[in-house]
Image: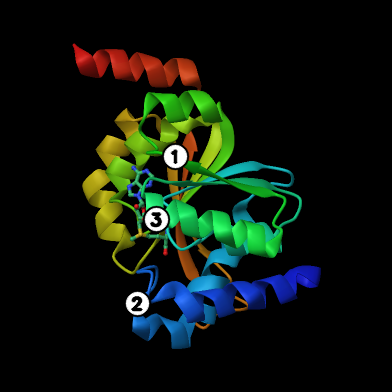
Amino acid sequence: MFGESVERLNRFVALLAEQGVERGLIGPREIERIWDRHVLNSAVVGELVPEGAHVVDVGSGGGFPGVPLALARPDISITLLESMARRVQWLEEVLDELSLENADVLRGRAEDKAVRAELGAVDVVTARAVAPLGRLAQWCLPLLRTGGLLLAVKGASVAEEIARDEAIVEKAGGESIDVVQCGVDVLEVPATVVVIEAAPRSVRSRKGRRRRR
Ligand SMILES: C[S@@+](CC[C@H](N)C(=O)[O-])C[C@H]1O[C@@H](n2cnc3c(N)ncnc32)[C@H](O)[C@@H]1O
């Protein structure tokens, strides 16, 4: 899955094992299961990312899913968007250390107008463990071009989350909601990903205007 990037991936895992717990990026119990629950669980999301896409990983934290995704898919470019300064510092160190040329780091919040303006309309937004689905849709759908995809990595309670937040997703401009299992051939527990397609921008702004009345 990682081709020539496997050494850089090993280096990323080593950095997390050395500094991740101390710097509050990963829990102590996560180190022993870092490969399947974090690294592979992140990389397999690439199954849903089109060739050459510009991806924004919202709330990248310690670098998931953004860093494994960038290493597994040298054809894509990825912006790691993170609001917390010390995590931004970590992500910049990681990109530097791994000489990861298809990734960059942006400090900010997904819902900020300035961040939206800086990013433009991207092809794909990824997010793992950042916010409930409805809030994610409100923050992330405005970052996407028409037909762009929000890929939210979720856990076992995904069906309940969708039932609860479906109306919010639709109002935020989600055209469709699907649930896809990624990594079925590689992982004992595949990654569950909610795929939300962005409606045309004109439709999204009409919905926004209706909501404000
Ligand atoms: C629980 S951590 C998850 C980190 C990583 N995605 C993972 O799966 O390990 C959530 C991260 O999202 C960041 N975050 C929360 N809300 C955000 C927002 N609106 N925009 C950008 N980053 C955000 C937090 O600072 C934090 O680093």
Is 209 or 140 nearer to us in this picture?
Answer: 140
Residue 86, numbered circle: 3
Residue furthest to the right in view is: 4
Name the element at disc 3.
helix
Which residue corresponds to the image point at 39% horizontal and 68% vertical from the top-left?
25
Can residue 52 be seen in the rendering of this structure?
yes
Which residue corresponds to the image point at 43% horizontal and 25% vertical from the top-left?
114
Label 1 belongs to which residue? 176
Residue 118 to residue 4: above or below: above
Q: Neighbour class for label 1 at 10 Å: few (<14), some, many (≥20)? A: some
Which residue corresponds to the image point at 67% horizontal and 42% vertical from the top-left?
53
Residue 9 to residue 89: above or below: below
Instruction: Using residue 52 as the reference point, say whether residue 179 is left or right of it.
Output: left
Is 116 or 40 nearer to us in this picture?
Answer: 116
Label whose residue precedes the other's in the sequence (3 or 2): 2
Q: CA distance from mark 3 to mark 1?
A: 36 Å
Q: Are marks 3 and 2 in contact (CB under 8 Å)?
A: no
Three-letter amino acid code of the residue under disc 3: Arg
Can residue 152 be seen in the rendering of this structure?
no
Residue 21 to residue 107: above or below: below
Q: Nearer the viewer, mark 3 or mark 2?
A: 3
Label whose residue precedes the other's in the sequence (3 or 1): 3
Q: CA distance from mark 3 to mark 2?
A: 16 Å
Measured as percent of width and height from the top left, residue 148 is found at 56, 36
Q: CA distance from mark 2 to mark 1?
A: 34 Å
Q: Neighbour class for label 2 at 10 Å: few (<14), some, many (≥20)? A: few
Instruction: Using residue 73 as the reference point, say whether residue 179 is left or right of it.
Output: left
Label 2 belongs to which residue? 27
